[in-house]
Image (cartoon, rainbow, N blue to C red):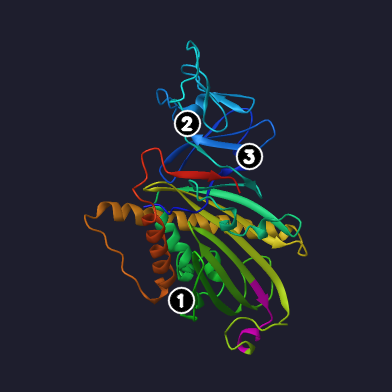
């Protein structure tokens, strides 16, 4: 089950060039990406409409892509413009193409004809003018919904991340009150970590307001605001009061992309405000990579266990509220497509 009518991250900008086509998978689709002469990206089904050979083994010719099996050439819209040996290009030979847009160095995918740039999640924390940013990604042998669950419930930090992020606040990730609020196409989760020493570049105990939005199809947008100890109590453990002196701020932008039913790709970026020393982001990003390796080990073990069970059923506690809400959004989004998507997909691509 994959979310529909939303934007996915398909690849990094550096993976898409005007020299050679790039193959990728996304939500059960097999896609090929390349750049036109003006640098704009193009996306279409990887399987050639003629004999289903991979177009990712093809040749870019200007704004067009030629299959190197029988030489069929398609333009950026997927129309056949040349079929060697035939009098005219057959109109029936047409590739499914996908609208493509690029923004902040990430490639995004959305569904056919309903692609709406207004539905793009915010990538403000990737703006190099205001943030020091470092990027990374992981391949996970797991259902992407398990990764969504993981990001919706950070109480696991006290255990999975006991050697990294879990040092910060320890059991506070479990016992401190969590505020979960439905938002448009997602959920918002907020909590305080009180009087704790962050396991990174800061060397003072702080109160930290940890707040993030998790939006379709699986995009995590978090900011952590660090304050002097006592700020949480002054705010009565609600949202920080206006005028509270923020000492530091970090941000994390993450996106979970399903490749197939049991494989995912996890894109992430670590950001620290430009007002902070740039070297701080290196330590922050290294810690982030270590923490996500911990997630990978646990999630892949969880997937392996689930795959061995005849009738696996997940139970939920109060800490799973955001995850349960988000799974419902996935179900609603997937069921909005009628009939079920055909083999070659019923979606559009966006580069964001």
Mark 2 Cα shell of 10 Å, populated few (<14), some (14-19), many (≥20): many
Label placed on residue 95: 2
Where disc 1 sits, the SS reads helix
**Residue 65, quarter of the rendered image:** top right
Residues 295 and 118: in front is: 118
Which residue range is magenta in the image?
A: 225-233
Residues 345 and 26: in front is: 345
What is the x, y in percent for residue 44?
Answer: 51, 35
Residue 327 counted in the magenta span: no
Residues 189 and 139: in front is: 189
What is the x, y in percent for residue 319?
Answer: 42, 74
- Which residue does the image show at 49% across and 27% down from the upper left? 55
N-term-proximal mark, 2 vs 1: 2
**Residue 169, quarter of the rendered image:** bottom right
- Looking at the image, residue 68 lies above or below residue 151: above
Mark 3 Cα shell of 10 Å, populated few (<14), some (14-19), many (≥20): few
N-term-proximal mark, 3 vs 2: 3
CB-based contact (under 8 Å), mark 2 and mark 1: no
CB-based contact (under 8 Å), mark 3 and mark 1: no
User: Label 3: which residue?
Assistant: 14
Q: Which label lies toward us, 3 or 2?
A: 2
């Amino acid at each position: 089950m994959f979310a529909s009518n939303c934007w996915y991250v398909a690849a990094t900008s550096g993976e898409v060039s005007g020299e050679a086509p790039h193959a990728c998978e996304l939500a059960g689709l097999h896609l090929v990406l390349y750049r036109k002469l003006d640098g704009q990206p193009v996306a279409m089904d990887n399987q050639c409409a003629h004999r289903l050979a991979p177009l990712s083994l093809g040749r870019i010719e200007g704004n067009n892509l030629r299959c190197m099996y029988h030489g069929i050439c398609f333009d950026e819209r997927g129309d056949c413009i040349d079929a060697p040996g035939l009098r005219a290009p057959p109109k029936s030979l047409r590739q499914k193409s996908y609208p493509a847009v690029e923004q902040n160095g990430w490639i995004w995918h959305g569904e056919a004809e309903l692609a709406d740039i207004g539905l793009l999640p915010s990538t403000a924390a990737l703006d190099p003018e205001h943030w020091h940013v470092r990027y990374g990604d992981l391949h996970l042998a797991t259902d992407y919904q398990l990764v969504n669950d993981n990001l919706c419930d950070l109480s696991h930090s006290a255990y999975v991340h006991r050697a990294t992020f879990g040092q910060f606040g320890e059991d506070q990730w479990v016992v401190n009150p969590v505020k979960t609020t439905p938002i448009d196409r997602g959920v918002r989760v907020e909590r305080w970590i009180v009087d704790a020493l962050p396991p990174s570049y800061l060397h003072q105990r702080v109160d930290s307001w940890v707040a993030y939005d998790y939006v379709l199809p699986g995009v995590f947008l978090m900011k952590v605001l660090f304050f002097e100890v006592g700020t949480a109590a002054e705010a009565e453990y609600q949202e920080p009061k206006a005028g509270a002196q923020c000492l530091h701020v970090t941000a994390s932008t993450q996106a979970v992309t399903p490749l197939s039913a049991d494989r995912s790709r996890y894109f992430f970026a670590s950001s620290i405000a430009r007002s902070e020393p740039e070297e701080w982001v290196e330590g922050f990003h290294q810690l982030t990579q270590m923490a996500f390796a911990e997630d990978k080990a646990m999630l892949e073990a969880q997937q392996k266990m689930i795959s061995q069970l005849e009738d696996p059923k997940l139970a939920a506690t109060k800490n799973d509220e955001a995850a349960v809400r988000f799974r419902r959004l996935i179900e609603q989004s997937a069921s909005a497509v009628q009939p079920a998507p055909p083999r070659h997909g019923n979606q559009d691509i966006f580069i964001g």
